Image (spheres, rainbow, N blue to C red):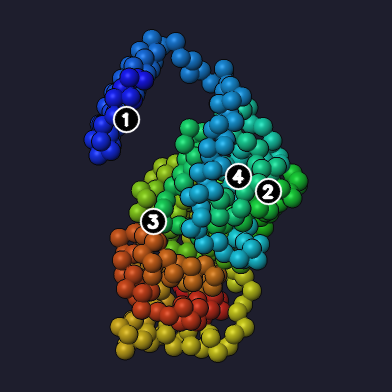
Amino acid sequence: MKRLLTSIALLPSGLRAAAGEKHLKRRLLRLTKHSALLLVVLGVGGMLLAASGIIPIKASSRHWALTDWFLSFAMQRSVATHSLGIKTPSLHSLDDPSLVLKGAGHYESGCSPCHGSPQLRLPRVPAAMTPPPPYLPPKISHWEPEELFFIVKHGVKFTGMPAWPTRHRDDEVWAMVAFLRALPALDAAAYRKLVNGNLAPSLDVPQYGLPRREDVPEAVTESCGRCHGADGRGRGEGAFPRLAGQRPTYLYAALQAYARGARHSGMMEPVAARLSREEMRALAHYYGNLKEAAHAGSVPDDAAAIERGKAIARRGIPSKGIPSCIDCHGPSATPKNPHYPLLAGQYARYLVLQLELFEKQQRGGSAYAHLMRTTAHRLTQEQMYDVALYYAALPPTAGN
């Protein structure tokens, strides 16, 4: 090497530079070849190691502490990076009780079997997973709302946590974020009340036309009643729709649409997919035949908005190609297509959300859902609000 450098030094400057560059290229070429060979050896060695079957994949062996740390670190950094562009609603809106309530019902059925709850901290089966799903209340404060949104929406690889069942319902994912932020402050009693409400007592309330307890479909007590109530009146101000007195044909078609993924909802799709056609018919008949003698919630008091909504509902907006609402949804003495939902007495907040989802083409639905897309797209936000208030102010029986 010394003699090579001496020889190069005796050459003219131009030749010395060329010789040095040529030597450097030869060294880089040799290094590249050695590196490629090393990668091939490592790859072949890894394949042989995997093929030997000696790598332990048993969950009972757990991760090494170093592996556990590395996976957790990689997850934290990935979530922090990929959640940078997410626009977070105001923290005040995430504290909305109806939004928290909406997330609570799904957490009990979709999340607590793995992550536990204040009622049951460590479920036995998921505790044997590797890595085991964490108990969430102590973990929530470590994540920002947009990070929680990213995790809930997309799930986490190599942990068994799935992505949200549909990519079309960010509103539902934010509801889960709202509930998760409230979860650390809940004890067992507060959690049970938030998740189940008055499910058990409502089964014995006679004024809503409820059948005898033994005639209530099993799915009502297992899942449906948690959100919609056994009396079909829903819970909260629009967190869930009122089902009592709704057309059974519409309810059955809606359950079928949820089950096949045609109507988008990460909360409803898994529930409906577990139901048989007979169970769907029983639920539709049960809720459709409940008597609703009062409004689902408080009656709107914005008289001007209600009048504007009334005009749209009755006459439509011909200049914008918007038909009247009553032609399909009533109230009217003329019988309507039983596949169309009744809107009288429904929660205004729920109706506005449905119109927004139709406008963004994120709702889906039965074979008739496409009829609403062009209509919703032509309505302004104020007009959606006005029509929703008009229907919310009507007595539920006005739709029949």
Q: Is residue 53 left or right of residue 186?
A: left
Q: Earlier in the sequence, mark 1 or mark 4?
A: 1
On screen, residue 153 above or below 314: above
Name the spot of residue 12 as percent of width and height, x first.
25, 36
Quickly name the residue at label 3.
263
For the point 62% across and 49% down, the residue is 143
Looking at the picture, tell me which residue is in the foreground, 178 or 390.
178
Kind of residue indicated by mark 4: Glu
> Of tags 1 and 3, which is closer to the observer?
1
Q: CA distance from mark 3 to mark 2?
A: 34 Å
Name the spot of residue 24 as percent of width and height, x first.
31, 30
> Of tags 2 and 1, which is closer to the observer?
1
Quickly name the residue at label 2.
141
Q: CA distance from mark 1 to mark 3?
A: 79 Å
Q: Secondary structure at mark 4?
A: helix
For the point 26% across and 31% down, the residue is 11
Q: Label for residue 9?
A: 1
Name the spot of residue 169 as percent of width and height, x first.
45, 57
Kind of residue indicated by mark 3: Arg
Q: Earlier in the sequence, mark 2 or mark 1?
A: 1
Q: CA distance from mark 1 to mark 4?
A: 79 Å
Q: Label for residue 108?
A: 4
